[in-house]
Image (spheres, rainbow, N blue to C red):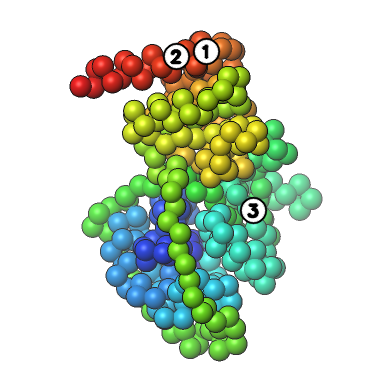
Amino acid sequence: MNNVFVYCEITEENRIADVSLELISKARKLADGLKVQLEAVVAGYQVQQLESSLYPYGVDIINYADDEKLFPYQTLPHFSIVTKLIEEKKPQICLFGATSVGRDLAPRVASYLRCGLTADCTSLEIGQYEDKKENKTIDNLLYQIRPAFGGNIIATIVNPYTRPQMATVREGVMKKEIYDPNHTGEFVRIDTKNYVKQSDYCIEILSREIEKQKIKIKSAQIIVCGGYGMNSKPGGFELLQQLADTLGAEVGATRAAVDGGLAEHERQIGQTGVTVRPKLYIGCGVSGAVQHRAGMDQSSKIISINTDPNAPLNAIADYTITGDAFEVIPKLIQYYKKNSK
């Protein structure tokens, strides 16, 4: 049977992006369920050293293209490599991260191959489809699951008649898991001369400037998140920053707080922001709309501080504190400092 493909994105530090490792972890389970192999597609420069970082996550075959012209990412060369490889190997599933690279590349590939693409999935499962017109059941389909209509419903999308079944998946929604530390597989080099036309290199990069990310909310182990309720008194987000500094945490925000000018967009958690999986999430004045919960409900521990005992966030919280965050937070800071000495 045809295999499962994952396009692996290369970071500026020349390592496999976390979202790609998250996808591989999930794809390994999909491939096991389908009884097929898992293949990774890697294109960049000096990528041979990445072999050892991929196999432990369960990759059976690494298809890699190594060329100085392939890094940093350019659309057309990567497009040519991915489409020709798919045409050759005919995978049944092909997955991309819902990053700026994935959102640029995946739609082009899907359009060229004339197959469906579901964007920003939050879950992937294997199931079946009942075709009532043809009166038949189609097995081993990819259920591409994502929020729809502003997060008010969860839609399950299937592509019963086109291959490959393609999806992009948001960062942080899949769990990155080691499959087998000793797992190994094939390492297949792609000859770029046979895949990429010279005309694909139509962009010349004269210079590059890389700005280091100051806000590292995606990888934060503790997040103190503020909602629009922190606007009820002056200095709300400054107070959250004090708590975050005390705990060694990052400050997050809901969309309402960001739209209200209380925090930068880079701190926004939720369906239209980032997805996070911290060990501890503390929501302060966060009502917990479904769009926000979609971005943080996989947190290991959730604490909700809210004056409303019926706030939706309380329904998924491990601990709830009913009270004014402006009164509760200073007590938390004081208590932590006192007991951490």
Give how far across and how far down residue 128 sits, in percent. Answer: 61, 47
| Pointer 3 or 2: first along the chain | 3
Kindly state the secondary structure of the residue where label 1 is placed: loop
Q: Are marks 2 and 1 in contact (CB under 8 Å)?
A: yes
Q: CA distance from mark 2 to mark 1?
A: 6 Å
Give how far across and how far down residue 278 sits, in percent. Answer: 40, 35
In the rendered image, which residue does mark 3 sit on? Answer: 118
Q: Nearer the viewer, residue 48 or 32?
A: 48
Identify the residue at horizontal 51%, vertical 10% (top origin).
Answer: 323
| Pointer 3 or 1: first along the chain | 3
Q: Bin the neighbour count of mark 1 within 10 Å (Cα to Cα): few under 14, some 14-19, many 20 and up.
A: some
Kindly state the secondary structure of the residue where label 2 is placed: helix
Does residue 178 appear to the left or right of 127 in the view shown?
A: left
Q: Nearer the viewer, residue 122 or 288?
A: 288
In the rendered image, which residue does mark 1 sit on? Answer: 324
Outermost left residue: 341
Kindly state the secondary structure of the residue where label 3 is placed: strand
Residue 198, quarter of picture: bottom right
Does residue 224 appear to the left or right of 341 in the view shown?
A: right
In the rendered image, which residue does mark 2 sit on? Answer: 328
